[in-house]
Every structure is written in C-alpha cells, then in structure tokens.
Amino acid sequence: MFTPPPEPPMWAWLLFGAVDFAIRIVALGVVPKRRRASTSTAWLLLIFLWPLLGVPLYIIFGSWWAMGRRLDRDPEASALVNTILAGSATPEPTAHDAPGVDDDAAALMRLTGSLTGFPASSGRVVALHNDTTETYRQMAASIDRATHHVNALYFQTSWDEYTAPFYEALERAKARGVTVRLLVDHHGLRTIPGHKAFRRRLDDMGILWHKMLPFAPLRGHIRRPDLRNHRKILVVDGREAYIGSHNLVAPDYDTPSFQKAGITYDDTSVSLTGSIVTQIEAVFALDWYYASREVLTPADLTPPTTREKDTREKEAADEAPASSMQIIPSGPAFRDEPNLRAFVHMVSSARSHVSIASPYFIPDEALIAALTNAALSGVEVELFLSEQFDQFLVGHAQRSYYGMLLAAGVRIHLYRKPTMLHSKYVVVDGSLCAIGSSNMDVRSFGLNYEITLVADDARLVELLHGNDERNRARSRELTYEEWRDQPWHVHYVDNVCRLWSSLL
C-alpha cells in the first residue's frame, strides 16, 4: 500500500512564504531600474505569476549583467572610435550647422551626436537599392573595384544562388591581395539552413571572419543569449558603403517553410560615398574589436593616398553635392536608445508629412505619442507595414497598436501577402530622412546592435518617396472599421501578445 509522503513542517512553509514574499519585494525595486514601464510591468507579471520560472528567465534574459560595457565606459573601445573619426579626411563643406541646413536636422544631429559620440558629417548618395539580385550584383561590382580592403557585417548570410556573386567577388578580392573582413551575427548565422557548410566555405576562402556576440559558456562567451548584432554594412576601400535592410541571403532566406508558403522579403538599402563612409568604418571597427580584439587603425582602413579615387565617388560627386549626414549606431553599448530618440525627434518635427516603413512595429509610448500627435495636428502620417508576419507574437502584438493609430488619423498601408516588407526607413517633409537596419520595435531600440543613417538630403528623400509610391501600389490600406470589426478573440490574442512583446 502506498504511503503518502509526510507533510512538510510548519517552519518549511513559513520559510517558503518568506522567500516568495522577499522575491516579490526585491523584484518591485530591481526590475524597473533603467527599464521602460511596459517592460517592467511584463517582467513583474511573469515573476509574480510564476516566480520559479520568472526569476531564472529574468536573470538570463532580463538583467543587465551580461549586456556588455557601454562605449563611454570602455576607454579602449572609445579611443578606437575617436581615433578613426579623427583620422578621417577633412569633412566636406556641408555640415549640420552650415547655412541652409534645416534647424530640425541640426538639432537632431546635435542630439544623436551627444548620445553616440558620432558627429555630423557629409556624404553623397550613389543609389537606392531594392531588387535583391541587382543589389548583390552592385555590391559585387563595388568589391571588384577594391584595391585595399573590404569590410562586411551582416546579421544573416548564406552562400546561395542570389549571394554567389557577392562571395565570388570576395574570393577575387582576396586573390589579388585585398584584405577581406567579414562579421556575422552568431544567432543570425545559425538560423539559415546549411550554416555549417557555409562556415567551411568561409574558412576555405581564407578571408578574415568572426561571429558576433556568440553565446558559448563552455568557451568563455557568457552574455545575454538574446543579444543580436542586427547591422548590415559593406564598406569598400573606405570610399563607398552600403547600409540598409538587405541581409546576405536569398529573398526566401533559404528556408523550406518560407518557400512552401511563398514568403519572400522586400528590402531597401542605400550606397554612399564621402566622409560619412568613415563613420560607417568606425562602427565596423568597433564590432571587429569586440569580436576579435584586434584594433583597426586609420591606416588599416585607408588606401594609400597616391591611388586614384574610386570612379563611383567621382561620378557621385559630379551628380550631386554633398549633404549633411550622420551615422547613429545603437545598442547596449550606447546610452539612452539613440535610434528611438532620433525617430521620435523626426516625427515630432514634421510639418506636413511623415512616412515610415518597418517590418516589425512595436513602438514605445513616446513614439506612439509622437505619431498620434502629428496626425491629430494635421500632419499626413503614413505607415508601411507588412500584412505577412513571420513571427506569431510580434505580428499579433503589432496589430494591437493599429486601433489607436487609425483613430488618430494615421494611414496604415499593409504590404500584401505573401511578400513581407523588410525595408526600414523614415521620411519627414522634404529633406530629412533615416534609413538603416533598425526596426520600429522595442528590440531594435534596446537590445539589437543597429546602424542608422540620418540625412538632410533632398535627393535621398525623393528616392524614398518613390519607394513609398512603389510600396503603396503593392499594399492595401487598412481602415479603422476593418480593424474594429475583427472577431473579439483576434483582439484578445493581439492584446495578450502586446503585453508579452515588451520582453522580446
């Protein structure tokens, strides 16, 4: 006959209750530190409901202990960035405080400069890139002109029929003595099928490459496992650079489930020349330092001055004057979420029109307030978002914000299935814009390492307006009535996902 275990003594129950109570009291004071209210609420709810699950998850994913050092508190890394920026060529005449530069643009660049240490610079737009195949071909053509170095950093990458021209160009560059460096995010690399064979191909090429933010405790790589380097950067000879939303992978991400569902990604990137390229090099050098501990000097990033300037740079200089530009690096190494502050400032400064393209839209309270305030004050606010979701929680959380935005007069264009809009940019009025790797979500604001270009450039704005027209033609506009008439259970799921989305 089975004998039930003895009841725990009273002291054990009292001890358990005291520990449980202490955990809750401590959590109330610890969790909200350096964290927005919505995120704090989600973590506290998890800890209060399921403390045995919530506490370990908070220590691993929610705490700041393994976020890494901030740039302004890391003398060696800070000196590296400052040396590269100081060793760059003299900036071209256009600067954020030059005559004719918009006051809002100047204020924006002063704000982000104080947060990141990256000053206003100048540059020229070579081209805006959408088509994936053609984008990689253009990148390959730029690499084929390299004489000194090629630096590339991407969140996700593979060697497939689309990216083959890119990697074949890297092979040719390596063969003629060009230094080739490649950084790939540890998590992003593993999400693409065939990543083991891809790593072997990189080793066989003989290029210099490293994984960013690896989580491998047995090898001494201990950090929050949810950190991502989400940047997309290509720099050739320190003279031409590409940034934007393109990863180095096929539009269907070489993923069988995406191929079966017909899901492809639509991206937008920009190529640049001028002094702004040095800022992009500085971001790469910082990540290279953290991945390899190698300090890249200005000599490592600058071709001999006797060599002719790149033809693309000359052509761009003939076509358009330099405009005021600035790079905004963001992530745990940079204080106070500079990308979010930049987006809020841009929207708040709008006088007539704002358009935003983002595949993931989970804003914080400040951005929501800026968007609704702009719409209610008569500014035309347009959001280009995806109808197709590749993540259940993110997709439903995103939809929970539609009601308040539509009610305020914000226009929401849903990029039609099965293609997913993956572009990431902001356009304000007639000259100010931003484009890069940052999504409009809490992960990109606080956890991901991102790179964003802000520019007071009428030509780039015109190109992005053209992109808006292209996206508008491929989208359908969501109305408040359509959103409101969704079944009750759909709204319920959306709201539940919104609550937990702050933990992403």
Image: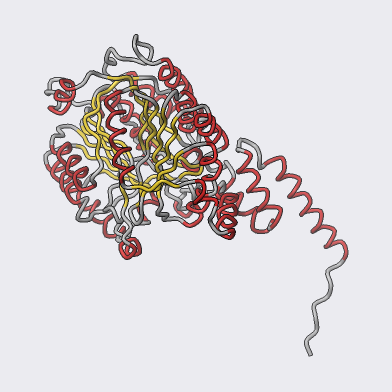
- Residue at screen point 72% across, 43% down: 28
Q: In the image, what residue occupies the spot 61% across and 35% down?
A: 34
* Picture layout, residue 104 above or below residue 330: above
Residue 195 is left or right of residue 353, and the answer is: left
User: Residue 297, percent across and down?
Assistant: 30, 27
Comparing 319 with 209, the one in front is 319
User: In the rendering, at what x and y percent does residue 457 appear?
Assistant: 31, 23
Q: Left or right: where does residue 307 sit relative to residue 396?
A: left
- x%, y% of residue 172? 13, 44
Q: Which of 395 and 121 is in front in this view?
A: 395
| The N terminus lies in quadrant | bottom right
Residue at the outermost bottom position: 1
Give the image's coloring scheme. secondary structure
Badge count: 0
Q: In this view, does 406 lie to the left or right of 238?
A: right
Q: Residue at x 47, y 52 (%)?
A: 395
- Above or below 468: residue 497: below
Query: Which residue is found at the position 37% from the left and 39% from the top?
Result: 424
Give percent across and percent down for residue 308: 11, 23
Please identify the quarter of the rendering in which residue 121 is found.
top left
Which residue is the extreme one toward the right? 10
Q: Which residue lies furthest to the front in this view?
A: 481
